[in-house]
Amino acid sequence: MRDQELRNLCRKLRPILGFRADALWHAYATAETPASKLEAESLIQILAIQYLSATVQEDPILLPPPSKEAAFGEFVLGMVHYGRKALYPLYLRRQNFIKHIGIFSITGGGKTNVAQLLLLGLLAQGIPFLVIDWKRSYRALRTLSDPKVKSIHIYSVGRKTASPLNWNPLRAPPGVHP
């Protein structure tokens, strides 16, 4: 049973250590003396704590990260993290936008930040977009120093301002069946 646990740790370390994780497992599995086996086991456990979790008792969920090639694209989303290590940037490609894209998380999980990063990428490449912003979260984009950001038109939904957006999605336009 102990062998299987250590082998699983080496598998989890592989996205971070690469072939060195295989070498760790090989050193443990082929150790000739109990002392060398214990030394290899200790090294595997130390690296697992260093790269995968903060404490021995912590049991993080470690999903395999995408390859660096699969994570490459044109529109930055953030960083791929595995365990406690940042690996490389994560992007969306232009062809992803013709498919379905969903941003899901709990309140405060960063959905608006991810969407704003995408919008800045679209803006930088001159791709038009429309955001219906009920909570007025996207006004913060206008405070950035990028001159392209100043070209964004912001309309206030349901408010009496200089540029209101008088639209009710629950009422169909005249002559159109709901």
Image: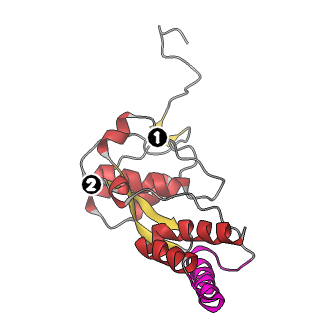
Q: Nearer the viewer, mark 1 or mark 2?
A: 1
Q: Looking at the picture, how far across and down is residue 140, in whole percent?
A: 46, 60
- In the rendered image, residue 32, in percent from the top left (x then y), is placed at 57, 85
**Dot 2: what SS?**
helix
Query: Nearest the camera: 20 or 127?
Result: 20
- Judge whether residue 158 can be spotted in this image: yes
State yes or no: residue 48 in magenta: yes
Most extreme residue toward the right is 57
Which residue shows up at 52% across the image and 67% down it?
82
Q: Are marks 1 and 2 in contact (CB under 8 Å)?
A: no
- Residue 38 counted in the magenta span: yes
**Up/down of 129 relative to 166, above or below:** below
Could you tell me residue 65's position as x and y percent? 48, 59
Q: Quadrant of residue 1?
A: bottom right
- Count of numbered circles in the view: 2
Question: Which disc is residue 124 wearing?
Answer: 2
Q: Magenta span covers which residues?
A: 31-56
Judge the density around disc 2: few (<14), some (14-19), many (≥20) Cα neighbours within 10 Å: few
